[in-house]
Image (cartoon, rainbow, N blue to C red):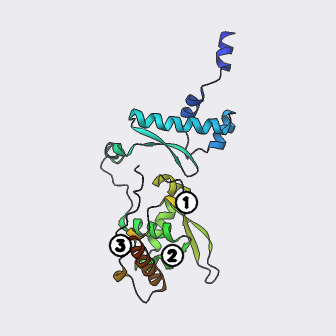
């Protein structure tokens, strides 16, 4: 009887949330968690925020973040050097400079075709685009009506890896665009970017800094 009572005892909400979040492969949404635990969504949301605040106050090596429409554990940014040494162990798993530049163009210009990405970077990006697709950071999203060219956008996995809740949390655009003088004047894409840079600098005094991307 005692064993049956113990088995049927309700697990505390915070403990249940911690247990679930330790095994998820992607951010867990509040609505889904509330459904699984059979608790009101507002109660689950409050518990998640309380846990996140508690981990921060205690200076844990991990924190709980709302990203990509859900919640997930992440190692704290200050612990990145130790984590890198353990995970990489002499191996380099980072994206190349070309891949990072291409990913940046896609993130800010999406949906965008390969040819337009290549126009912005000034080099052919086909190989790099395939790498980004294979890594799950970029995906196809329809085609361009005029040309039939395949369009690409960033994925939820991109948001998850960047620690963002949505594309609106990307850093300010102007500081990361090419210098106006470096953009091809005869390129339509280049002209559009040059105009955007000039307008942003005129409005912000030329040195407006974007918000830092959250750490790993």
* Quarter occupied by residue 156: bottom right
Q: Residue furthest left?
A: 90
Q: Residue furthest top?
A: 1
Which residue shows up at 48% across the image and 69% down it? 129
Give residue 8's mark. none
Q: Residues within 10 Å of mark 1 (few under 14, many from 20)?
A: some
Per the image, label 3 sits on a secondary structure element best described as: loop
Give residue 206's mark. 3
Per the image, label 1 sits on a secondary structure element best described as: loop
Q: Which residue is mark 1?
A: 155
Viewer-side residue, 58 vs 103: 58
Mark 1 → mark 2, Cα distance in angstroms: 16 Å
- Disc with the residue nearer the chain's start (1 vs 3): 1
Instruction: Say whether residue 71 is visible.
Output: yes
- Disc with the residue nearer the chain's start (1 vs 2): 2
Quarter of the image where the N terminus is located: top right
Q: Residues within 10 Å of mark 3 (few under 14, many from 20)?
A: some
Viewer-side residue, 173 vs 8: 173
Give residue 204's position: percent from left, percent from top: 40, 70
Give residue 105's position: percent from left, percent from top: 46, 70
* Quarter occupied by residue 197: bottom left
Which residue shows up at 42% across the image and 37% down it? 56
Give residue 111's position: percent from left, percent from top: 56, 71
Mark 2 → mark 3, Cα distance in angstroms: 30 Å
Give residue 114's mark. 2
Point out the frontmost of discs 2 and 3.
3
Mark 1 → mark 3, Cα distance in angstroms: 31 Å
Instruction: Say whether residue 123 is visible.
Output: no
Point out the frontmost of discs 1 and 3.
3
- Disc with the residue nearer the chain's start (2 vs 3): 2
């Amino acid at each position: 009887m005692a064993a049956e009572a113990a088995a049927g005892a309700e697990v505390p909400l915070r403990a249940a949330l911690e247990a679930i979040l330790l095994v998820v492969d992607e951010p867990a949404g509040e609505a889904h968690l509330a459904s699984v635990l059979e608790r009101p969504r507002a109660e689950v949301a409050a518990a998640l925020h309380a846990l996140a605040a508690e981990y921060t106050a205690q200076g844990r090596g991990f924190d709980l973040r709302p990203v990509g429409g859900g919640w997930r554990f992440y190692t704290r940014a200050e612990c990145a050097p130790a984590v890198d040494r353990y995970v990489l162990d002499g191996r380099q798993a980072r994206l190349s400079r070309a891949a990072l530049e291409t990913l940046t163009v896609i993130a800010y210009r999406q949906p965008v075709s390969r040819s337009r990405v290549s126009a912005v970077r000034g080099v052919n990006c086909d190989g790099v685009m395939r790498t980004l697709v294979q890594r799950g950071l970029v995906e196809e999203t329809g085609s361009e009506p005029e040309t039939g060219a395949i369009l690409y956008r960033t994925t939820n996995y991109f948001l998850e890896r960047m620690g963002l809740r949505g594309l609106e949390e990307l850093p300010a655009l102007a500081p990361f665009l090419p210098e106006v003088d470096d953009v091809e004047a005869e390129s339509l894409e280049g002209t559009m970017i040059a105009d955007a840079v000039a307008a942003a600098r005129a409005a912000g005094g030329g040195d407006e800094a974007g918000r830092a991307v959250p750490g790993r």
